[in-house]
Amino acid sequence: VGCFLAPRNLYASVSRVVKEEKINSDLWIHNLGFDSSMVSSESDITTRNVPLLVHMPSRRGIKGSTYVQKAIDALKRNGVEFSYKEVTGVSHDDALAIIKEADIVIDQMLLGGIGTLAFEAMGFGKPVVSYIIEDVRNKFYPDCPVFNATIDNLEERLTHLISNYDLRIQLGKEGVRFAREYLDKKTVNEGLINLYNELMEK
């Protein structure tokens, strides 16, 4: 195989089994139907003084939900002001409605990459807390505004974000810009077509 397509959001998984020189990782490819009309305007981004945190695991074990709950419990014991909602088993439309109401979205804490929930939340201008493998982030995700955390520092990172209103607004705006630049379906499709054409010419 001359080239293995591993878009930036899948590099963390593919790099474990495919040599780096065989990986093309210039694209973001996702399973969303995002277009520019679905992305929030930066001027519309707001956040509550007492933020609502939302965690929406498709599978609790894989998403590290036990560690999320542990951090949430510790925050409550320490008197940090916030509200929290863990949501499972809802329709996609209902999930999007809940994301729109959130002030902070907590995604996966174990996989080391970026998933669908994070993409959708960024498109709606929501700060996303998730775990991205640091070396992979530095090389392939430097422009992605996910607020990186690990299972060891999740409580500390959430405390910082909950207490920093301006940072939440900033991350929301950066997420919207990121979604517009990389996640629009027209941009993704054109990039794929160009890549396939290049591979066919080799």
Image (cartoon, rainbow, N blue to C red):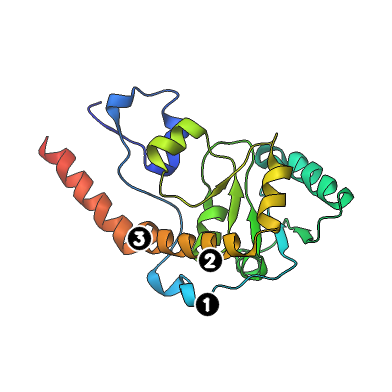
Whether pointer 1 and pointer 2 mark residues with C-beta atoms closer than 8 Å, the reply is yes
Kindly identify the residue that appears in the image at 22 percent across and 45 percent down. Answer: 195
Counting from the top left corner in percent of width and height, residue 184 is at: 37, 63
Q: Look at label 1 and name its amino acid.
A: Asp
Q: Quadrant of the N terminus?
A: top left
Asked where in the image residue 49 lies, by quadrant, the reply is bottom right
Q: Name the mark on residue 181.
A: 3
Counting from the top left corner in percent of width and height, residue 111 is at: 58, 36
Mark 2 — residue? Answer: 125
Q: Look at label 2 and name its amino acid.
A: Gly
Q: Is residue 64 left or right of residue 172?
A: right
Of pointers 2 and 3, the one earlier in the residue sequence? 2
Depicted 36 relative to depicted 78: above or below: below
Q: Look at label 3 and name its amino acid.
A: Glu
Mark 1 — residue? Answer: 44
Whether pointer 2 and pointer 3 mark residues with C-beta atoms closer than 8 Å, the reply is no
Q: Quadrant of the C terminus?
A: top left
Counting from the top left corner in percent of width and height, residue 157 is at: 67, 46
